[in-house]
Image (spheres, rainbow, N blue to C red):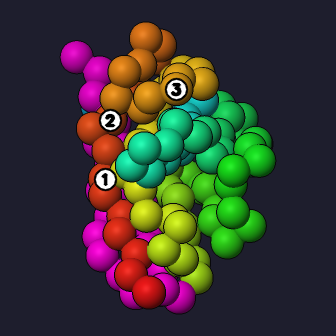
């Protein structure tokens, strides 16, 4: 079965950095588009950025300029580098293949999703 697994979340103080990782069994990241999403409590699921099969990046409006999506095909891993984190970045972060634009990252009719990784930023 295809699985996506996020890692790298945690608790940091404002101004800190984290790098999230998304790995997969069953999906080759040079053959599929991978997106990073986040959902804060009480808010909708936001697509932040997608890295396409050919390596191009598509950043969406909610994507802070402090964040960068990248990938390492040798490791079949997609990253989300997050710098100068702020309390407003507190959310569960998900990666997905073919995830679309769901209102709720936990109720997703499309694609393959990971279980998410919690990022908590304190002031």
Q: Main secondary structure of the magenta part?
A: strand
Q: Residue at x 47, y 13 (%)?
A: 110
Mark 1–mark 3 Cα distance, whole angstroms, equals 18 Å
Does the image show residue 63? yes
Q: Is residue 74 visible?
A: no
Q: Is residue 8 magenta?
A: yes
Of mark 1 and mark 3, the one earlier in the sequence is 3
Residue labelled with disc 1: 117
Q: In the orientation shown, which residue stands out farthest toward the left? A: 1
Extent of the magenta region: 1-24
Q: Quadrant of the C terminus?
A: bottom left
Circle 3 sits on which residue? 103
Looking at the rendered structure, the secondary structure element under dot 2 is loop
N-term mark: 2 or 3: 3
Q: Residues within 10 Å of mark 2 (few under 14, many from 20)?
A: many
Q: Is residue 90 magenta?
A: no
Q: Residue at x 69, y 50 (%)?
A: 62
Q: Nearer the viewer, residue 27 or 38?
A: 38
Choose between 84 and 45: the one closer to the eye. 45
Where is residue 120? Give x, y as percent.
35, 69
Q: Please report the residue visible at 51 percent of the width from the left and 37 percent of the height from the top.
A: 45
Q: Which mark is residue 114?
A: 2
């Amino acid at each position: 079965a295809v699985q996506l697994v996020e890692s790298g979340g945690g608790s940091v103080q404002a101004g800190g950095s984290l790098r999230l990782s998304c790995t997969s069994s069953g999906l080759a990241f040079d053959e599929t588009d991978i997106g990073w999403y986040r959902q804060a409590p009480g808010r909708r699921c936001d697509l932040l950025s997608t890295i396409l099969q050919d390596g191009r990046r598509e950043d969406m409006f909610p994507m802070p300029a402090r964040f960068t999506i990248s990938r390492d095909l040798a490791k079949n891993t997609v990253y989300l580098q997050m710098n100068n984190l702020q309390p407003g970045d507190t959310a569960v972060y998900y990666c997905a293949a073919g995830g679309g634009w769901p209102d709720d990252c936990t109720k997703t009719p499309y694609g393959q999703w990971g279980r998410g990784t919690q990022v908590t930023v304190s002031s």
